[in-house]
Image (tube, rainbow, N blue to C red):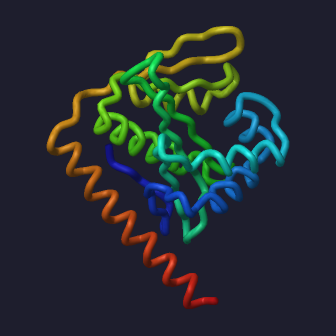
């Protein structure tokens, strides 16, 4: 899927050392976006604690950096031994960057990563009122089921192929180069 993003936008994996940027991104979410991301109202302290625990070895996270600032993020987490070969995806995009292709690009990258890790089923949960997330899930052929004020979207994944593995390798290489250039730019400015 072609990713049409705002000028200066880069989608790449987040690294363990970028917890501060992830926390700042989550804290910048307006109240409706934060409620949509976490499934209810949560405090700044909850968000900060969540961000501090998020960048772990079992999670694969992608971010959309616009002019070097994290404006959107996607998390991919395995569901564990009780649901092998299944994972959960969660997205957050700051209000001013919604409807600019950021969510689509993040979900596309997350689905590619899930495919290449052998996950057969990807779950996405959202509030019933979160029409944006439902539309995004449908865009990627998710099957939606409604249950007690929430919606669960499920996307079946294909098996990895040499081409899908190469696509991820190329995007990861580009992302790493972008991260290194951004770090060098920050060091030079300081």
Q: In this rendered view, identify the residue nearer to me: 180 or 144.
A: 180
Q: In the rendering, at what x and y percent does residue 60 appear?
A: 46, 45
103 lies above or below 27: above
Q: Position of residue 24 (x, y in %)?
A: 71, 58
Q: Is 49 situated left or right of 170 in this image? A: right
Image quarter in which the N terminus is found: top left
Q: Specify the quadrant of the image occupied by residue 117.
A: top left
> Between 89 and 19, which is closer to the camera in this rendering?
19
Q: Residue at x 60, y 66 (%)?
A: 69
Residue 132 sits in which quadrant?
top right
Residue drawn at (55%, 18%) of the image: 152
Residue at 33% over, 40% down:
112
Quadrant where the C terminus sits is bottom right
| Residue 20, horizontal then vertical, whole percent | 66, 61
Q: Nearer the viewer, residue 146 or 52?
A: 52
Image-quadrant location for residue 128: top right
How many marks are shown on the rendered structure? 0
The image position of residue 28, as x and y in percent, is 74, 54
- Side of 162 relative to 51 (left or right): left
Q: Please give left or right for residue 3 compared with residue 63 in the image.
A: left
Write the residue at 61% across / 53% down: 97
Closest to the observer, 143 or 110: 110
Relative to residue 99, is residue 173 depicted above or below?
below
Q: Furthest-left residue in view?
A: 162
Residue 149 vs 160, above or below: the answer is above
């Amino acid at each position: 899927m072609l990713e049409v993003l705002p000028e200066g936008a880069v989608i790449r994996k987040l690294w363990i050392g970028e917890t501060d940027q992830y926390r700042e991104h989550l804290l910048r979410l307006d109240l409706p976006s934060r409620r949509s991301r976490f499934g209810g109202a949560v405090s700044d302290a909850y968000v900060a604690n969540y961000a501090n625990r998020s960048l772990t070895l079992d999670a694969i996270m992608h971010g959309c950096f616009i002019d070097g600032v994290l404006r959107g993020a996607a998390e991919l987490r395995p569901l564990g031994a009780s649901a092998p070969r299944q994972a959960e995806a969660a997205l957050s995009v700051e209000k001013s960057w919604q409807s600019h292709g950021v969510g689509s690009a993040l979900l596309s990258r997350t689905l590619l990563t899930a495919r290449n890790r052998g996950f057969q089923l990807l779950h996405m949960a959202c509030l019933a009122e979160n029409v944006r997330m439902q539309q995004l899930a449908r865009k990627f052929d998710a099957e939606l089921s409604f249950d007690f004020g929430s919606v669960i979207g499920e996307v079946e994944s294909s098996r990895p192929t040499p081409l899908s593995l190469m696509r991820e390798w190329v995007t990861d290489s580009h992302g790493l180069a972008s991260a290194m250039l951004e770090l060098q730019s920050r060091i030079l400015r300081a």
